[in-house]
Image (cartoon, rainbow, N blue to C red):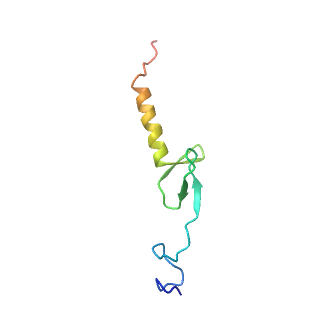
Amino acid sequence: MCEVCQFVHCPGGCPNAPEPVAVACCRQCGAALYAGDDCYRIEGEYWCEECVDECRAVAEDELSDYQAPED
């Protein structure tokens, strides 16, 4: 039993709790993604929210200059 939290298996808030294990890494920046993290799965690869947001901003900038081809 833990002397700090009084549990046999320490919950996440206990200083004696084990470090969480990453379940995936962001394809773009390599950041660790843990169970419960918000992320995106694109063509089988995981992306963190920050990297998707950066891509979205670039796409919006490029699309503002987009002109549809004429028939």
At x 46%, y 47%, the residue is 50
Above or below, comparing residue 33 to residue 64 in the picture: below
- Seen at 47% across and 86% down, the residue is 6
Where in the figure is residue 57, as x and y percent of width and height? 42, 36
Taking the view exactly as shown, the residue that stands out farthest to the top is 71
Against 16, residue 33 (above or below) is above
The residue furthest left is: 64
- Of 7 and 71, which appears nearest the observer? 7
User: Where is residue 18, by image quadrant?
Assistant: bottom right
Q: Where is residue 69 in the image (x, y as percent from the top left)?
A: 46, 15
Task: Please name the residue shown 49% across and 87% down the image.
Answer: 3
Report the number of numbered marks.
Answer: 0
Please state the horizontal and vertical placement of residue 4, each as a whole percent of the image.
47, 84
Q: Is residue 57 placed above or below 50 in the rendered structure?
A: above
Give me the residue at 43% from left, 22% from top. Answer: 66
Residue 59, horizontal then vertical, whole percent = 45, 32
